[in-house]
């Protein structure tokens, strides 16, 4: 949380991006990265804690 706050207030301060006509700011970028990490955690945990049978 502290790292994200630091990045948002310093490194991403004047960040503006566009992808497929959608404009992103610094807060949008933080939420997008968080959502991608949560989405990737699902398959990772499924494969890690429930390996396929041999």
Image (cartoon, grey):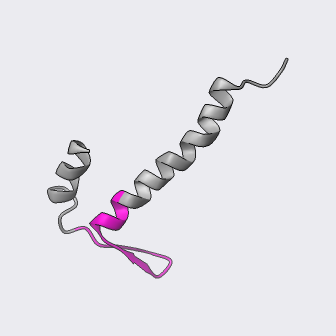
Whether 19 is among the magenta residues is: yes
Tag count: 0
Residue 36 is covered by the magenta coloring = no
Q: Is residue 36 left or right of residue 48?
A: left
Which residue lies most toward the top here?
54
In the displayed structure, 32 sits above or below 50; it is: below
Nearest to the observer: residue 49 or residue 12: 49
Relative depth, front residue between 22 and 49: 49
* Residue, far bottom: 21
5 to the left or right of 21: left
Which residue sits furthest left?
10
Coordinates of residue 50 in the picture (x, y in percent): 71, 26
Q: Position of residue 12 (x, y in %)?
A: 22, 60
* Residue at 65% across, 24% down: 49
The relative height of residue 52 versus residue 36 in the rendered view (above or below) is above
Residue 35 appears at what percent x and percent y?
47, 54
Magenta residues, start to end: 15-30
Measuring from the top left, give residue 9's x and y in whole percent: 16, 58
State which quarter of the image contains the N terminus: top left
Q: Is residue 14 above or below residue 37?
A: below
Which residue corresponds to the image point at 50% horizontal and 77% vertical from the top-left? 20
- Residue visible at 55% across and 49% down in the picture: 39
Quadrant hosting residue 22: bottom left
């Amino acid at each position: 949380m502290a790292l994200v706050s630091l990045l948002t207030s310093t490194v991403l301060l004047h960040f503006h991006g566009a992808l497929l006509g959608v404009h992103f700011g610094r807060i949008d970028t933080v939420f997008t990265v968080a959502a991608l990490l949560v989405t990737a955690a699902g398959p990772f945990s499924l494969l890690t804690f429930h390996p396929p049978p041999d």
